[in-house]
Image (cartoon, helix red, strand yellow):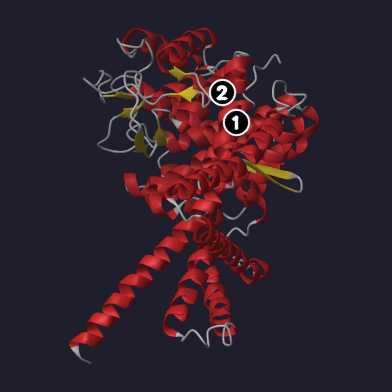
Amino acid sequence: MTDEDIDQLTLRLVQGSITLFKWITLQFLILFLTPFTWSIMPSGMPLYIVSYTLIFNVYWGIMSKDKRLNFIWKPYVGYLCITAILSLALLDAFSLPGIVLAPLFGLLCLIVVRRYKHFRKIYATTFARRMTINVASIALIIAIVTIPKVWSVSAECQGHGSFKTEKDEILQRRNYLASKLIAPPKKVLHEMPSGIGAQFQGEWALYSCSMFAMSLYNISQIYPETRTENVHYIDSLISIVLSPELREYDSNRWKEDALSTLHSYETSHISYISHLAWMIGEYKAAGGGNKYDKLYAQLCNAMNGRILHSAALNLQTYPNESIYMPDMLVAIVALKQYAALNKGKYASTVDAWVDKAKKEWLDPKTGLLVSFLNVDGSQITDMPTKGSYSALNCAYLTLIDRKFAQEQYSLLKSSFWKEGTLSGMKEYHDHSPILGMDIDAGPFIMGLSPSGTAFSTGAATFFNDNEVRSSILRTAEICGNTLSSGNKKHYALANIALVGEAIMLAMRTNAPANL
């Protein structure tokens, strides 16, 4: 091969790569801008787009123009075989209709682009005409994207405002979560994004199960006729959280299994055992039997003893890390619930912790509970109080101390609430970065915290703050885009972060017990 041949080959590879990138980007952009079409798209559509675009792009580049259409079936057959294998390997699913029909989306994009180029070539003969066509095209795209979006947001938000009008939606969202989380533990873990690593997969799976259990308990109080089915679901979730597969993330960090240490006060595992205890408490409070009574007593005895034996009534989530306030609050919620079910046992520990929190753990700038503490219970200098943590703290406090929760919620709104077309909680009270990313808060835009906004729904619901709650549900609809299928509903973003769907349902149903 001569140097000229090598140069030509390199040039063709570069041109082909650029073309491939442009077509894949265009298709993903169209998908992103038309979320109202997601409900009819196969779940593996991103993989299908990359697969057929790559294969047809290679075919188009190596086949001569006069033979391309004659043998167009060859790359299609290749695409079907390769995509079927990739689907089984990467998605654990196989949708033959989805694989077969997906290239029609690419073909439609190709036809539209070619027609647009042809139109410009004929009519855009002057600069003024080119500008007119470009502006008109942009306006048309905005209209195509905006009008269906405005309609869908208006339609979905129309019933918001009372649990009576929201009943169908709430139960449909419950059904969706049940279809995803009432499953073998490995499948539940597989629902969590693999890119966040094994530890966060385990944490997100635990939170998904815990928040869904909270949802089910709440729904049982709001709609008593659903209680029997909800108790059955909570029982299944407890079994999943008890599984070795889900405990593994915590065991790896502590180098021991949490359930084998319940006799000792010299360790922590506070996040795992507190969520498990809370779920069992909800199971019993919703009308479940006594099958977990022995374990429930052991879990709460271990938590109570470890808290009292700690340096400042706080325990680490993991070794050699700070105290995470929301994780400690789950333990206090669990002990509070245990006290309510067992004649006040451990209530003194709950009271002591809350009293100490009011005196020692409030941020001097915002008046809110701090997000982190040193192991000795002292505040960490220059550590920001985060909107996501503060909003979750408020939600948990509604289950512990109503008056304290009300005070904290008022302070949360005054420091973090941001009103607008997209209303929500900021991640930082003193600045609003345009873009950012946090494993807890999620990707925040213009300072808004996805997690903080979702968590704040809990206090807004509890305190009947319908203005804030409705604004948050509108923001969730605009950003999340509800998809419906049969008797199920979910935000499209649940396909990426299922834990967000579970959190949102738990928070929007966090009604006071005397509803």
Q: Residue at x 57, y 48 (%)?
A: 240
Q: Residue at x 60, y 40 (%)?
A: 143
What is the quadrant of the C terminus in the image?
A: top right
- In this view, 29 is above or below 311: below
- Look at mark 2 in the image and give the residue it sits on: 458
Q: Is residue 80 left or right of residue 379?
A: right
Q: Quadrant of residue 25?
A: bottom left
Depth check, front residue: 449 or 307: 449
Q: Residue at x 27, y 78 (%)?
A: 10
Mark 1 Cα within 10 Å, few/some/many (few <14, many 20+)? many
Percent position of residue 281, x then y: 60, 30
Q: Are marks 1 and 2 in contact (CB under 8 Å)?
A: yes
Depth check, front residue: 176 or 53: 53
- The amino acid beneath tag 1 is Ala
Q: Earlier in the sequence, mark 1 or mark 2?
A: 2
- The amino acid beneath tag 2 is Gly
- In this view, 506 is above or below 396: below
Looking at this view, name the residue that lies furthest to the bottom.
1
Can residue 491 be seen here? The reply is: no
- Look at mark 1 in the image and give the residue it sits on: 506
Percent position of residue 502, x then y: 58, 38
Q: Secondary structure at mark 2?
A: helix
